[in-house]
Image (cartoon, rainbow, N blue to C red):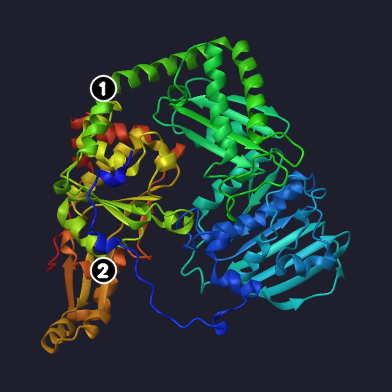
Amino acid sequence: MDNDNIFNNEDDANLSAPQAAEAVYTEDNIRTLDWREHIRRRPGMYIGKLGDGTNDDDGIYVLLKEVLDNSIDEYMMGYGKQLTVDVTDTTVTVRDYGRGIPLGKLVEVVSRMNTGGKYDSKAFKKSVGLNGVGLKAVNALSSDFTIMSVRDGQARRAVFCQGNPVLVEEPFPTEEPNGTMVNFTPDPTIFRDYVFREEHIIPLLKNYTFLNTGLSIIYNGKRYHSRNGLLDLLRENMTKEPLYPIIHLKGEDIEIALTHANQYGEEYYSFVNGQHTTQGGTHLAAFKESVSRTLKDYFGRNFEYSDIRNGMIAAIAIKVEEPVFESQTKTRLGSRDMGPDGPTVAKFIGDFVKKELDNYLHKNLEIAEVILKKVQASERERKAMAGVTKLARERAKKVNLHNRKLLDCRVHLNDVKGDEEKKAASSIFITEGDSAAGSITKIRNVETQAVFSLRGKPLNSYGLTQKVVYENEEFNLLQAALNIEEGIDGLRYNNVIIATDADVDGMHIRLLMLTFFLQFFPDLVKKGHVYVLQTPLFRVRNGEAVRRSRRKGKGDKAKEETYYCYTDEERIEAINRLGKKAEITRFKGLGEISPEEFRDFIGPDMRLDRVTLRKEDGVAELLEFYMGKNTSERQNFIIDNLVIEDDEDIS
């Protein structure tokens, strides 16, 4: 669907590319950066976004992965069945028991670009790190970096600061077992106010154990281990009960697991050489195609692939010689072949799935029957919705300028090719009403931030079928704006941000939107695309300074003594700082916050709460209780848990 022509956009003048200013361009403008300076100036090229540790794709976790990948490569080559990972708020120590880095090259492998053992396919046949960059990036982006290698009774240690050597020891005798130890502290001048968070580290480590059965990872004293590989991975991540026992198939250099559940959409976990390819790639595309074709051929019916895969939850892991990833962060596989002399990725996966899955279904007829019933149910629902879907799409195309539902951003209007950094930053704010949308619209970054304005409270979609997504105008237009009608592969914005007022109505709208996403697009949540915007509840400022600045026409001093508080604790702290001079404002709606004040709240340092969906959350039960038809039960719950506090005099 061509969304650019569906929704209203700002004046072309506001979105046109800026004209290049004249500048003197001479030989003096040409510079050559050394490896340290290049990494530190352009960290995004090596580790993606920076972040502060709030999100699982923040740069500090990429640094951790780069270190872990080297240890995992050792295990994959048959050396070292255990590794220890110790993490504090700011520092990481990883110790493996592999072969250890050759002592004579210890310094070079962490400080000389394009240096490493992964270029020699005999030493590392199916490795993740092939570019000789990973440890160098960790070194350059750390305020403290120490590496020690132990080989056959000899050890050597080197210490660096921001990539510069501080101490390089000569080899010395030791009784330590072979292996490598890396200790690093991300540079706080680059990763500002960062904290390593356990909720992001544990899933990462668990994935390593799922993909390397027999490997033990000791994290801060606790042992993680897997005996069943991808079977354990699906059990860990599924938030709904499977319709049939998980199908688990393994071969040389390939492992798959799949099942169906009563949920909408598709859910995949894909890996290459132990690397979690969160954006898929050639292997995932081949897997989805081959599973669909195999099931279609097995049942001998002309099923649509979308009906076969609706509700499917699956994982695939393959091992490839010299894999080609589409970026240094290795989130998408670009390889077409399994290796220099191997078959194509598509043929390798297709042949395996065709043989093994087909054999499995012939031996397990009762499971095949459950799959058939699920596919038929999806087919019936799709056909029943055919007319509704067509009308909804036509209605979306006819949305006129007066509706002003979507104000798009330049990265999508211009369909920027190859600008992955901007696409990763692309966001859409889902706001309530025109006043809130107006504040955000006036000061948003038109390059990467779009705004979708809701009209009143959305429908409570709990317990309804997918038909409501198309019959309800609000949901239909939002789905079209996000471009997720055919699944989230076409998602136009990396960050879907719910931005509602900090009052009862705002909270209700937030819950209604979360219910919608959890019901019909759970994979959007599981992939980490949905957020809730935090906005300040209070503004505490020096009232005397404000009045004085108004009289003098200057506001600098008043701004210096203004505190935006997101919690009661922050409010009390601000009041204590200002004492009797404190002037307190309670923000109830986003429209009450002036555009200039709003600028920082949706800027690079905006506070976002990522919406997560995990098995232990019990989301199905929560939705049923809070969004279901048990009104009297909820009323009793509210009465039993009601807490009445004294009102405060807040102006």
Name the residue rendered at 46%, 83% in the picture: 24
* Residue on which disc 2 sits: 571
Q: Residues within 10 Å of mark 2 (few under 14, many from 20)?
A: many
Residue 449 percent location from the top left of the image: 33, 57
- Asked which secondary structure carries label 1, the reply is helix
Query: Which one is in front, 483 or 568?
Result: 483
The label shown at residue 2 is none
Residue type marked 2: Arg
* Residue on which disc 1 sits: 387
Closest to the camera, between mark 1 and mark 2, is 1
Residue 66 percent location from the top left of the image: 64, 57
As drawn, is 392 to the left or to the right of 448? left
| Residue occupying the far bottom of the picture | 552
Query: Which one is in front, 552 or 15?
Result: 15
- Asked which secondary structure carries label 2, the reply is helix
Query: Which one is in front, 564 or 276?
Result: 276
Name the residue rendered at 31%, 35% in the picture: 623
Q: Residues within 10 Å of mark 1 (few under 14, many from 20)?
A: few
Name the residue rendered at 72%, 63% in the picture: 114
Whether residue 567 appears in this view of the structure is no
Residue 174 figure quarter: bottom right
Residue 382 figure quarter: top left
Residue type marked 1: Gly
Of pointers 1 and 2, the one earlier in the residue sequence: 1
Query: Which one is in front, 440 or 302?
Result: 302
